[in-house]
Each structure stands twice: as structure tokens, then as C-alpha cells.
Amino acid sequence: MIPFSYFYRWAIAGVSLIALFFSCRFALAWGAYLLLSAQTEGVVREWKIFDQGARSAVRAQYHFLVDGRDYTGGYTFAESYWNEGVAVAALSDLVKASKNVFYRPGNPEHSALERIFPLGLLIKSLICWAVLFYFVLLNKKLLRSKSY
């Protein structure tokens, strides 16, 4: 029979890899969030609704000025919709809203119409680290009691 400690070590290794995976994804998304630190007023030239698998998404083509130079960009909004009718209704709200363009100060060609903090990835990462911390503490407790 395989001892319990064998499975326990594999569980710790697995949770460690998952925590590392989500932490790296969060770090990359947070870096992209921080890089889009400047903003200016932009003008949307074209709105488009397209199918994204079983859902619909909204894409905007826009242009903006930075230091007298004209830049263009395209942005697919993060929220997707169940069908095209819901996307059309959401599009009317998006058209009414003023469009600020977020861009990198050193490279305005990298821009977006939304600057979204990666909260979901942060929560997943913190949960994984909490589970790993629990497993490590449980391991220390089990080693002290030598119950396995």
C-alpha cells in the first residue's frame, strides 16, 4: 500500500503549480493594466457586433490624438452577450458613453477603451495560496504528531 505522505506531497506540488499559474497570469494582467496609465478623449469610428463562439461581442474601431499625432486602434469589449439582440441593446449604452482611450505613455499604439483590474485572477491566486498555506501547516502538524 502506498503511504499517505506520497499522495500528500503530490497534492502540495499540484496546488503549488496551480497557485504559481494563477499568480503568473495575474502578474501579466496587472502589468498590462498598469502600463495603460495615460488617457485621452477618443472618437469611435465604427461599432461592430460579431459572433464569438456561442456568444456575441462588441468591437469598436477608434482614433485619438497624442502630442499632435493621430493613432487608431481596435478594441473588443470584455463583456460578451448571450445573443445578438442583447448585444444591440448594450451597444446603445456603449455609444452614449463618452469614450476615454487608455494608452501607454511611451507607446500610444498600445491602447484600449477599458482599463479593467484583473480582480478575478487575484482572487483565484489568493485562494490557491491560502490552500497551499493550509496544506503546509497541516503537514507540519502531521509531522509533529507522526500520525501517518
Image (spheres, grey):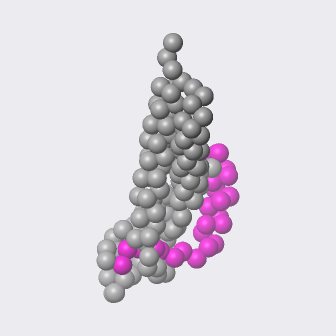
Residue at point 57% right, 38% down?
Answer: 144
Magenta segment includes 83: yes
Residue 71 visible at all:
no
Query: What residue is rendered at 44% in x and 70% in y?
Result: 34
Q: Which residues are magenta?
A: 82-105
Q: Position of residue 96 (x, y in %)?
A: 63, 72
Quadrant the C terminus occupies: top right
Q: Position of residue 123 (x, y in %)?
A: 59, 54
Nearer-the-camera pick, 67 or 28: 28
Against 136, is 34 above or below?
below
The residue at the point 46 percent across, 63 percent down is 30
Task: Say which of 67 and 9 sits in front.
Answer: 9
**Residue found farthest to the top:** 1
Tell me residue 134's x, y (percent). Answer: 59, 44
Left or right: 107 in relation to 100: left
Looking at the image, which residue is at 49% across and 46% down? 19
Picture mark count:
0
Point out residue 65 in the picture as x, y percentages from the top left corner: 39, 81
Where is 117 relative to 18, above or below?
A: below
Task: Pick the residue in front: 40 or 69.
Answer: 40
Tell me the quarter of the picture where residue 120 sits: bottom right
Residue 66 placement: quadrant: bottom left
Q: Residue furthest front?
A: 145
Residue 33 visible within the image? yes
Residue in the foreground of this view, choosing between 17 and 73? 17
Q: Is residue 147 above or below residue 129?
A: above
